[in-house]
Image: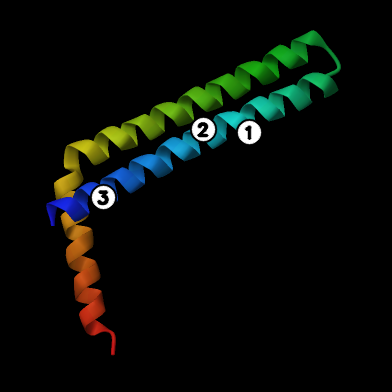
């Protein structure tokens, strides 16, 4: 059971890391496009500031989720494993 918990934890960590990378790729691409469309330097700086705030906030939240998963992985994944086993028994 311990190996299954570690496998589930690694999968969740990989997914969170991939999502974080995707988030920053989208933000950087969007800022490049916005920089080309913005009518003034002020608008560009406001958009850049908003993007950085959104990116940092989302990244911090995702890191907090990683910390929560690491701290409580046995409890969280044991419950998932037990519930999935119970659901499999209920299906005809």
Identify the mark nearer the N-term, 1 or 3.
3
- How many numbered marks does the figure carry? 3
Picture disc at residue 26? 1
Specify few, some or many for label 1: CA neighbours under 10 Å numbering under 14, 14-19, or 20 or more: few
- Which residue is disc 2 drawn over? 21
Q: Earlier in the sequence, mark 3 or mark 2?
A: 3
Which-is-in-front pick, marks 3 and 2?
3
- For the residue carrying disc 2, how many other residues have a C-alpha within 10 Å: few (<14), some (14-19), or many (20+)? few
Report the residue at 18% width, 42% height from top: 72
Against 92, residue 62 (above or below) is above
Point out residue 16 in the picture as x, y percentages from the top left corner: 41, 40
Which residue position holds label 3?
7
| Image quarter (top left, top right, bottom left or bottom right) of the N terminus | bottom left
Task: Residue 3 in the image: state x and y as whole percent.
Answer: 17, 52
Q: Residue at x 62, y 16 (%)?
A: 49
Residue 57 in the image: state x and y as whole percent: 47, 26
Disc 3 packing (10 Å; few <14; some 14–19; many ≥20) = few
What mark, if any, has residue 42 been given in the picture? none
- CB under 8 Å between callouts 1 and 3? no
């Amino acid at each position: 059971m311990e190996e299954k918990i570690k496998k589930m934890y690694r999968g969740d960590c990989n997914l969170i890391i991939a999502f974080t990378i995707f988030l920053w790729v989208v933000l950087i691409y969007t800022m490049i496009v916005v920089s080309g469309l913005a009518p003034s330097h002020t608008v560009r700086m406001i958009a850049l500031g908003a993007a950085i705030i959104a990116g940092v906030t989302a990244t911090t939240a995702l890191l907090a989720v990683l910390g929560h998963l690491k701290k409580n992985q046995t409890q969280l994944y044991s419950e998932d494993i037990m519930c999935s086993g119970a659901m499999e028994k209920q299906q005809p």
